[in-house]
Image: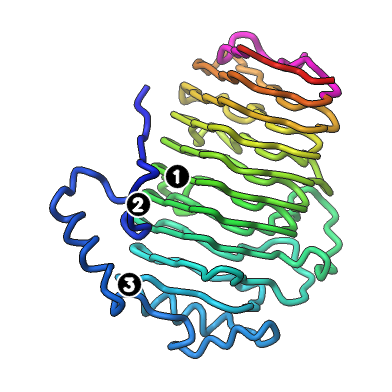
Amino acid sequence: MRTIMISRRVALKVIASMPLAHGLACRSAAAKISNEDDVVHASVFGVVSDGVSNDTSRLQDAIDRSVGKTLLIGGQCRIDTQGLSLRSGSRVRFEPGASIKLLAHDTPSYQMLRMWDVIDVVLDNATLDGSRELNSAQPKTHSEGYGMGISIAGSSKITIKSATTVGCWGDGIYLANSYQPTSMPPQDIHVIDHHANNCRRQGISIISGRNVFIEGGLWENIGGTAPSAGLDIEPNSNRDVLENIRIVNPVTRNCKIGILVYLLKIAGVESKDVQIDISGQRDESAKIAAFSVSGLDTKGSIVKGRIVNRSATWIKPKLLSVESHDYDKRGPQIVVTDLKTIR
């Protein structure tokens, strides 16, 4: 099983996701980006960031025109549910205390920040507020809860550092296949120290992914619609993949389910090899379960692999069972080791 190793000692955030094999090219890029001419403030493009004005079109213009530079966002920006799309090569950094918040709306489905079918993107220190308290939507079905902070679809070489997503109608971060006919999975995704709070459905969802590394993170106070998990790993179809998914030292707090792996829809014509490795999970006060694997019916299809949760600490867990009664034992092996529970 191949793993991604991304050094946390990379001196310059802008080259954090570039392959080490670039060698001299990386050093050249580092020297270039140190030049202040390669950092541009969003205000140059007319972004007001006064906490009142709708900056959607101005921010999108800033993103589109700053590819190849680092776009610096400051102040309190407001946008509408049209959201923003990052481009291949985008480098976006938020100043300390800066944020983007949705204006009042009645929309159950949106993406505040899209990374769809792009490559080589770095997002640093972003704070995205879905304004849950200002959303007057009245969803009638579970499918109407797709208001996402960060939506990643079919993209690769994505690095997200120290992002905060609060008050999202759906998920803080959502990873899925491309919405183009190719159905390309997201791959080589590195999420570092993500904080999700008060999101209605999930802190983060992995629908599909290859070489996904989530390092650290706090997902708390998640609830409002099912499944209300800190992290939900849940394919939507047989086209999705769960290959080399690594989760290291996450904290799940006050969620209905801390980490959920739900495999109902992954079985099908194409054989699947599910590889999920979770280490160092700390769960506090899960309402149902700190960790749950469920929903699989292979129906004669091949779904193999391993789902590992090692060195977890569960504080005041309501349930100790991990494998649900509806989990097909012909599926991936479930391994829980070195578990510590605190009553």
Disc number placed over residue 69 in the picture, else none = 3
Quarter that holds the N terminus: top left
Residue at far top of view: 329
Q: Mark 3 or mark 1, which is nearer the start of the sequence?
A: 3
Q: Residues within 10 Å of mark 1 (few under 14, many from 20)?
A: many
Viewer-nearest residue: 40 or 135: 40
Q: What residue is disc 1 on?
A: 190
As measured in the structure, the alpha-carbon distance from the residue carrying label 1 to the one carrying label 3 is 21 Å
> Residue at point 58% right, 49% down?
194
Q: What are the residue bounds of the magenta stretch?
A: 317-337
Q: Is residue 335 left or right of residue 24?
A: right
Q: What residue is disc 2 on?
A: 16
| Residue 312 figure quarter | top right
> Dot 2 lies on which element?
loop
Q: Position of residue 309 (x, y in %)?
A: 60, 20
> Residue at point 39% right, 58% down?
121
Q: Is residue 242 above or below residue 185?
A: above
Q: Mark 2 or mark 3, which is nearer the start of the sequence?
A: 2
Residue 326, visible in the rendered structure: no
Q: Which amino acid type is marked by label 3?
A: Lys
State if disc 2 and disc 1 touch (CB < 8 Å): yes
As measured in the structure, the alpha-carbon distance from the residue carrying label 3 to the one carrying label 2 is 14 Å
Q: Residues within 10 Å of mark 2 (few under 14, many from 20)?
A: many
Q: Is residue 62 above or below residue 261?
A: below
Q: Which amino acid type is marked by label 2?
A: Ala
State if disc 3 and disc 1 touch (CB < 8 Å): no
> Dot 1 lies on which element?
strand
Residue at far left of view: 24
Q: Is residue 8 left or right of residue 280?
A: left
Q: Which amino acid type is marked by label 1?
A: His
44 falls in the magenta region: no
